[in-house]
Amino acid sequence: MSIPTTNDTTLSATAPGTSRSRLEPIWLGRGIALAAGVLLVVYPMVSDDIYYQNMIILSLVFAVGTSGLNIISGFAGYISLGQGAFVGLGGYTVGVLASTFTEASPWLWVPVSGLVAATFALILGAVSLRSRGPAFVVITVAFLFLIQVIAVNWVSLTKGTAGLTLPMPTWDHDIVNWPFYYALVGILALQLAMTWWIRRTKLGMGLIAIREDETKAATIGINLPTEKVIAFMASALFVGMAGGVYGYYLTFIDPRGMFSILISVQLVLSMLVGGKATLWGPVLGAFLIEWLNEMANNDWGGGNTRLLLFGGLLVLVVIFLPQGILPAIESLLNRRRSRGKAGLVGARISAGGSLGSLTGRAQVIERGATPDRAMLEVKELKRHFGGVTAVDGASFIVPAGSITGLIGPNGSGKTTLFNLIDDTVTAESGEIRLDGHRIDGLPSWERAHRGLGRTFQITRLFREMTVLENVVAVQREFSVRQLGRIAVSGAEAKAADELLEFVGMRAFRNQKARALSYGQQKLVELAQILMLDPKLILLDEPAGGINPVLIDRMGEMIRELNSYGKTFLIVEHNMPFVLSLCDPIHVLARGTTLASGTPDAIQNDPAVVDAYLGADFAIEDRA
Ligand code: ADP
Ligand code: MG
């Protein structure tokens, strides 16, 4: 029914022999959605009850508004209380244009109102780019009030608080509501088609990645500002059009009504009640809440009852239905279906496939032929946190084609160094060159596009995405064409499947990442960054906290990838692992490079032994 983050149709693939006779929830959902759609379309033809037609028209406006909100708030996770502004902007666009060009049909201005709303969304998106959480919500509220203030005070355009009167409908009295009704049904269909499509594309994956972990999203190539601004525009386009139809339908609009904060609150509430980040949840929520809203207005005294109702509902939903109605029903159905079934319990990490199948992406290099070129060159990097200088002028080189090790006691700044290299944390000073080109100063996603891949010491997968989605969320380059590419099937999914096969995790492709063990997460994170086709791979403690068999397998994979031309820089505490795999090895102590050399030289360096014994006085003596 919904388009949630699971892919229901394929969950059963790993549990062969399950009965096909029972109805899959997704088909049940599709059936209900189809029935509701048919009902919606035939309703005005079978009933001429104006009261209910009016209620459905309002519900349709809210359904489009909520579904639009779902893109920026449900997918990308940025809760906006300014969504109502786009309804109002749409209404005012049609209102102002229709009263200026009295000859033309007001319908002509409906698409224009969509464009106007999207343009304002672009501005709001650009202004709010750097804010998150509560600060973002406040900006969106301020935006709504600002637009309202403009509508009140720009009297020559909007007639201010007196309000605007639109032309009356010119068509046959018998069907007076039909054009509004069906125009809104059509706009809702377009809105849903767009939402459905976005959820399948690289753009949609990127938005969900932003919701789950924005910093991590940037390191896998997702251009944060561009994606957020596109999401904002997508969340406003059809909403503006629906607002235009709504204004025409009302025939009278004023700033208090059109830019009421209650509209925005109702939209957020509808999304949360129905189920955010799903396809149908926002629609269900919008119809439910609008129905309650009508009851509150007509039967329960309106005004403050409405506020009380919305506030109370919001609290109840947050406490009892944090996921919303649709996801709750869905997980209930899925639980009933899978009862008594082994599910994925039997799935195992496989021995792993060969990267040979990825010949299109990897080239085998001849070791002897590689010149002594630096893949990574770090010079005098510095960064401190309060009184702690975490990285203090570290300088070193990672030769192209090498598996270079980086060791040092806990707290010596290894992870921070990685953070500076991929701009997860910004360096205070110093130079970073990747394959000969300066990359300091570039944002994380551009460093990723230049060929930098990085795993985290504590893995950072997108927990609510499936394993496959985690891998296809990666963006190798930035282009509008790539954003629109379908991610969850076709070539992207095939490439991801091959990488998952390589790390031995293909059997888990439809599992949510949060369901994986720590070692499994490490493997998936490796597959994920391989999707970037990086020149240089930074691994932060790849053997940390995983079982010995997996450690061996990790070593084999690193060697194999290296034979395909991938350069590695590896932070690791497991000495046998480092000594057998890495050459050269750099030793970091107190944020600076203490020594560099072959495994043999490092093992016999007294300074290194001192540092590792924790005998800090030895280093201090030198200083
Ligand atoms: P390593 O990975 O070598 O164990 P880290 O880079 O994690 O070391 O940490 C180096 C030092 O910087 C430590 O003293 C740590 O407490 C400090 N540090 C790292 N990140 C932060 C941060 N975000 N805020 C404050 N201090 C930090
Ligand atoms: Mg660390």
Image: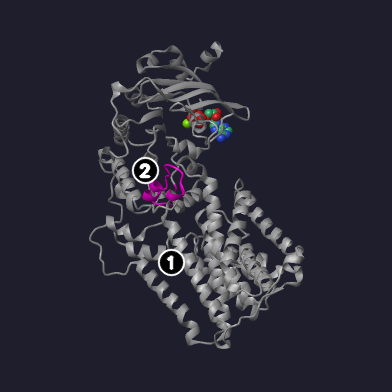
Q: Which of marks 1 and 2 is nearer the N terminus?
A: 1
Residue sitting farthest toward the front: 103
Residue drawn at 75 percent across, 63 percent down: 154
User: Where the C terminus falls, by quadrant?
Assistant: top right
SS for dot 1: helix
Q: Work out whether residue 576 or residue 102 is closer to the camera in this orientation and state it.
A: 102
Q: Relative to 578, does residue 53 appear above or below in the rendering?
A: below
Residue that mark 2 sits on: 524
- Left or right of 147? Residue 244 is left
Residue that mark 1 sits on: 329
Residue drawn at 64 percent across, 66 percent down: 93
Residue 105 screen position, x and y as percent: 60, 75
Residue drawn at 50 percent across, 44 percent down: 223
Residue 589 screen position, x and y as percent: 50, 21
Residue 321 screen position, x and y as percent: 51, 63
In space, the residues marked 1 and 2 are separated at their CA atoms by 29 Å
Amino acid beneath label 1: Ile
Q: Work out whether residue 424 or residue 103 is closer to the camera in this orientation and state it.
A: 103
Residue sitting farthest toward the left: 17
SS for dot 2: helix
- Left or right of 55? Residue 355 is left
What secondary structure prevails in the magenta region? loop
Q: Give the range drawn in magenta.
A: 462-481
Q: Is residue 62 magenta?
A: no
Q: Relative to 189, does residue 568 appear above or below in the rendering?
A: above
**Quadrant of res 20:** bottom left
- Left or right of 205? Residue 156 is right
Q: Work out whether residue 608 or residue 584 is closer to the camera in this orientation and state it.
A: 584
Q: Tell which tag, 1 or 2, sits nearer the viewer.
A: 2
Residue drawn at 46 percent across, 62 percent down: 194
Amino acid beneath label 2: Val
